[in-house]
Every structure is written in C-alpha cells, then in structure tokens.
Image (cartoon, rainbow, N blue to C red):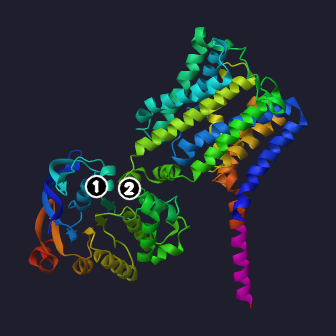
Amino acid sequence: MHRLIALLPWLALVAAMAAVLATGNGYYVTVAMLMMLWAILALGLNFILGYAGYFHLGLGAFYGLGAYGAAALSVSYQMPMFVALLVMPAAGALISVVIGPLMLRTRDLHFAVATLALGMIVSDVTNNWVAATGGPMGMGGITRPGEIGIGPLAIDGATTSGMFLITAAIFLALMIVAAIARRSDFVLILRGIKSDDMMTRSLGFSTTRYKVAAFAISGAIASIGGVLYAHIVQYISPEPFTFFAASFQAFVVLAVGGLGSLWGPVLGSVLLTGLPEVLEMDPHVKLLVYGAVLLIVTIVLPRGLASMGQVLSARARARASANAKIKEHQT
Amino acid sequence: MADALRIDNLSAGYGHATVLRGVTIAIEAQSTVAIVGPNGAGKSTLLKVISGLVRPTAGDIRFRDEDMSRWPSEKVVASGIVHVPEGRQVFPGLSVAENLWLGGYSHPERRQELLEDVLTLFPRLKERLSQAADSLSGGEQQMLAIGRGLMAAPAVLMLDEPTLGLAPVIIDQMTEALMALRARSSLSLIVVEQNLQLTRALCDAAHILVDGRIAASGATEELVGSDVMKIYLG
C-alpha cells in the first residue's frame, strides 16, 4: 500500500508529460521542456544546498559551461548532442573537484560569496571572450539531434516533440537517480554534515570529500541542464546564465519547492517557471512575484511546497486531538 | 594486562592557549577509567586530542603500540576509538534511526545487528526510532549519542560527561546501561565525569586532571575519598 502511494506522483508526472505532448501545441511543449530544465537544475542544486546545506549561488556558472560547451561542440566540431551530454557534465564535475576543496573550506555566507564570484567570472567570460563565445551576440546554429531509434519507435530530435522526449527521458532518469540517492548513505552523510559538520567528522567521515562530491554532482547536473538548454533553444547568449536569470532562479525554485525533498524541484519549477510562462508575465514582474512567493512560502511552509501534505495532515491531527480533549473535558 | 591506550607526555591547546601540559596515562585494555577534575582542567580537550579533533603540540598517543597522535579522526574511529562528546550531541535534523545508522557507517555488514544491540541496551530509543532527534528529552538524547557511538563497534568508548544535567531517575537508568556496557569483555571505557557516585560504581581506575596535568592516578576506591580528591573536587 505504502509503495503504491509512493508511485502515485511518478504516475502523475508521466501522465502530465503525456498530456502536454498529446496537445501537439508547440508552445506548451516548449514550456514543459523549460519546466523540466529548471527541475533538473534544482534537483542538482539539492545535493549541495538541500542536503549538505551549502549555499551554492554559482550554479549559473556550470549551467553556462554546459550550454557554451554544447554550442561549441555542435557549431565548431559538428559533434552530436550526446557527446556534449557526456563531455560537459564530466567537465563540470572535474572543475568542481578541482576548485571544490578550496571553496568548501568556507561555509555559510563566505561560501555563498565565493560561488557568487564564480558565476560572475563566467558571465564576464561569456560577454568578453568574443572569439569563443560570440560575446553579447551569442552563438546560434546549434544542431539538434536527428533521428534516433528505428522504425515506428524512432523519434526525430530536430522536432519540438522529439526534443521534448529526449529532455523527458533525461529528466526522468535524473529523477530516478535522485530518488535512489535520497535513500542512500551518501545523502544521509550529507544531511549529517548539514546538521553538524564537526560531529560528522568525529563519527569517522572525511566530510570534505563528501562535500566536494555533492558540489561536483550539482555542477555536473547543472552542466547537463546547460547542454539541454543549448539544444532546446538552439541559440545562446550570456543573459540566461547571469545570476538572477540562472543561479538565483534555481535557488528560488528549490527553496520554494522544498530543500532536501525529492518532489520539491518539480513543484517549484511548475509554480515558478511554468505558470509565469503560461500567464505571459513580464520578466520584471516575474522577479517581483518570485520574491513574494519565496517570502510567503518561507513563512507558511518553511520546508517548501513538498511538505504541504505533511503540514496539513499534522494540523488535522492536532485539531482532532484537541477536539478529542475538549470532548473528554465536557463529559 | 596489555595497555589499550598509552598517552605519553601529551601537550595540546587552542592557538596560544595551552590546555594540556604533559599528560601521561596508561589505559589497560578492557578496563573502565575515569578522568575527573575541576572545570577547565582539560578533560574534554584530552578526549578531543585522542579522537583526532585537536592536534597535540607535543608527546604521543599509542593505540595497541601504534603511534596514533597524528591520525585524522576518521582513521581513529575506523580503528575502534569512539568519542561521545559532551552536551548530548545528536544530529537535530535527523531521525533517531538515521542518527544511529550514521554511527554504524564503518561496519555496513553488521549494522542491523549493532542496531538491535543498541536498542536492547536503550529500549527507550526503540519507541522513538522515527522521531526527530531534537524532539527527544535530554536523557534520551544522551542515550542516542552513546548508542550512536556504540554503532561503530568500538574497542575504546570515550564518554564526556554522560550524566551532566540529567534528572536523578535518568542518571540511574544511565548508570545501569553503563554498568551493562562495562560487563562487556571487548570494551574499554574512558569516562569524564563529575558525578563521583557514578565514577565509583563504574570505574576501576581514576586519573585526576588539574590545570592540564595529572595530579593523581590510582584505583577509584582509593582515590575517591582521599585527600587529593577532596582538595581538588571538594
């Protein structure tokens, strides 16, 4: 029974994806892809921020790395997308492993500032290294994958629905990995680090190694997000990878959805990237709405949208037991 | 009997503040030893140095004839020396079961067995397995901290003030559990304790630490009630 209930959100997710695809409406399908993209970024961020408790505000750097790497591989080297899907996350993880030990010596605000600087460096590079990145003009002509599979099962990556299926497959695979990871010792140790780093060390864990691993996983997943972005939009410029457009938005999606939860990234993304898109919100208004939603959720549901069920059932139980006590008193 | 731990002329401190000044102690295998002394004498620092959380500035620590003074804390734990710090240290955001599970990390294949053992020793924890650790009472948190230490299947278990701030009834329960632990042949216990009654019931030997130096060592029975004890602890 318990297992069946745990399956329900997965079924709902797949059903929602199928429904969007069935509409055949290119706009809705594209919005759904963007929602999955943000859910991917947030679920990656979950490792370092949600579980380990480190305020990574430079996710945009890895997102940008993935996107620009994918663009370069496609435009300059005519490599298919799946090469970028292998190379860019590896690059993101490698860079994280090199700079991680240094950055993770700091914590709290210091770590946040250090990662913020990382994002700024990438913004600077993408704007000014014109020869490689096209500068503010960006890079176009990114080729989507062609036909994949055989016969009736073949999908054409060049079409919107084909790209949707590729994105959905990667997103679902990452969700399954996240679900397995959530129950693993690795994530338990990260939560121990968040709870008390020194005590985790005294239990015999080399906490730096775990933190660097979490940082690398977040970086690698953000790079995957970047690769997907480049191939979904087929044109990249520095703007989408700046602090407010990328790192901050990923943080808000995760925080609103629920830090350290499995479904938080999905719920946060539906609310914060899906709805504003469908409601055709002005980008400036969107930032205001983000701030307001973040504020409200922090106050009403400090553990995010994913905790709504728990909070409501706890309230109902508290009310029931209070009522029972009153009745007991009356009789 | 062979010594489990040999601490020789050990000095340590924090920055410019020297806390331990040439401490020498030998702890026999399978014995129960108390470290007593006034506040600020360096008792907790001594345990932290042994567990690798504070680096010694001089002297050495030998565990089964191996110099362990420079071991990182994870190696210390892996070799069987486990520190339960003072102040009911539990992971607040984690459940009781998760707290215990983290403690058993170095013995993945024996975890279930170790868990059942801990729950037999502290039956109260069994009722609270899925509860958040910070929702436990003080005594239960202390039990959880000790239980988590036991999950590492230690050869030497170091307890820092296990009864500090607990209600008398809980102290009795704790004493009972610690006496049961003491009866285990495979375990050496090092207990930092201000409660002399508990020390007397539990420990074979005691070392009095004053101002970073060992002022006296000997069998607990002889030391408790002796003049040295009266001078330093009143």
Q: Name the amino acid type tagged 1.
A: Ser
Give the side of residue A186 with respect to residue A322, left or right. left
Q: Residue furthest bottom?
A: A331
Q: Chain under label 2?
A: A
Q: Main secondary structure of the magenta part?
A: helix
- For the residues beneath circles 1 and 2, the answer to whether they share a chain is no
In what element is the residue under mark 1? loop
Q: Is residue B201 magenta?
A: no
Does B194 sit left or right of A130 as displayed?
left
Report the side of A315 relative to A205 (left or right). Answer: right
Residue type for callout 2: Leu
Residue B61: horizontal and vertical position, in percent?
A: 18, 54
Residue A183 image-quadrant placement: bottom right
Magenta stretch? A315-330
Residue sitting nearer the eye, A308 or A73: A73
Specify the subunit that label 1 lies on: B
Q: Is residue A258 left or right of residue B19?
A: right
CA distance for labels 1 and 2: 10 Å
Circle 1 residue: B51
Image coordinates for residue A101, horizontal then vertical, percent: 41, 35
Helix, strand or loop status at disc 2: loop
Q: Pick the quarter of the image with the N terminus of chain A.
A: bottom right
> Which mark is on residue A203?
2
Q: What's the residue at 46%, 77% (across, down)?
A: B123
- Count the labels in the image: 2
* Depth order, front residue of B195/B222: B222
Q: Which residue appears at 46% of the width and 71% of the height?
A: B116
